[in-house]
């Protein structure tokens, strides 16, 4: 069964897509926001405004025989910078950053994410539907994303995963190598965020 990526999002997929994105981004959401309701509000603001790295055209749905099975975000370094700036503007307009502590923690949290340079292709925010887990779909999604990176002229794919995540072993077993880490801590709440950054040559 063939997996393909598309930027055309069927409205019927949206609830599952948002859930997968929430699960993938939860470490950042938990660091920034005080509860799930606040995080979901911010997430919806990004989706409705078409802003952020996981929203089309950078966010792509994975289909297997026409069925939605997952998502991945992918963008060249310059496009990712624009997407993140667009996300910040959308959240500001939505009033999410009216809380100065939320704005401060978001800045800290995003600073812990991998920061691609020219020639890099970022991929992340990966999610696979429960029914498709364990079938190899996730591996195919990553392979398709790397192919898109090569076709875009990139020479290296970069991403991150939470330190201690079960995905760490996956990345080390599939040709990725570790290139650094990103940490954030908020003395006001005691919250901490720790990502490991990985690369795969294209």
Image (tube, rainbow, N blue to C red):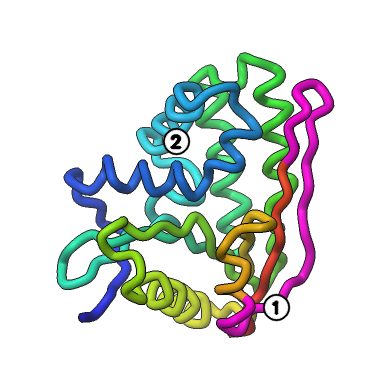
Q: Residue at x 40, y 72 (%)?
A: 141
| Residue 138: image location, x then y, percent | 40, 70
Q: Quadrant of residue 169?
A: bottom right
Instruction: Name the residue at the right extreme.
Output: 187
Dot 2: few (<14), some (14–19), or many (≥20) neighbours within 10 Å? many
| Residue 145: image location, x then y, percent | 45, 73
Camera-side residue of 151 and 69: 69
Q: Is residue 137 magenta?
A: no
Q: Circle 2 — which element?
A: helix
Q: Quadrant of residue 30?
A: top right
Magenta residues, as a range?
Answer: 172-192
Q: Quadrant of residue 131?
A: bottom left
Report the residue marked by disc 1: 177
Q: Is residue 189 magenta?
A: yes
| Residue 198: image location, x then y, percent | 67, 69
Image side of residue 162 versus residue 47, left or right:
right
Q: CA distance from mark 2 to mark 1?
A: 31 Å
Q: Circle 1 — which element?
A: strand
Q: Residue at x 50, y 44 (%)?
A: 52
Report the residue marked by disc 2: 46
Q: Residue at x 70, y 40 (%)?
A: 109
């Amino acid at each position: 069964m063939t997996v393909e990526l598309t930027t055309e999002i069927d409205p019927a997929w949206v609830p599952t897509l948002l859930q997968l994105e929430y699960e993938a981004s939860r470490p950042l959401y938990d660091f920034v926001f005080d509860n799930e309701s606040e995080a979901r509000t911010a997430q919806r603001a990004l989706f409705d405004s078409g802003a952020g790295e996981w929203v089309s055209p950078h966010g792509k749905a994975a289909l297997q025989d026409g069925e939605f099975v997952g998502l991945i975000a992918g963008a060249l370094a310059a496009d990712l910078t624009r997407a993140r700036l667009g996300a910040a503007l959308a959240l500001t307009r939505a009033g999410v950053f009216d809380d100065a502590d939320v704005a401060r923690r978001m800045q800290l949290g995003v600073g812990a994410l991998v920061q691609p340079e020219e020639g890099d292709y970022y991929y992340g925010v990966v999610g696979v539907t429960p029914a498709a887990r364990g079938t190899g779909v996730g591996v195919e999604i990553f392979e398709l994303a790397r192919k898109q990176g090569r076709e875009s002229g990139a020479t290296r794919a970069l991403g991150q995963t939470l330190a201690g995540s079960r995905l760490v072993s996956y990345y080390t077993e599939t040709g990725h190598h570790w290139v650094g880490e990103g940490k954030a801590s908020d003395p006001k709440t005691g919250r901490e965020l720790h990502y490991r950054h990985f690369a795969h040559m294209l």
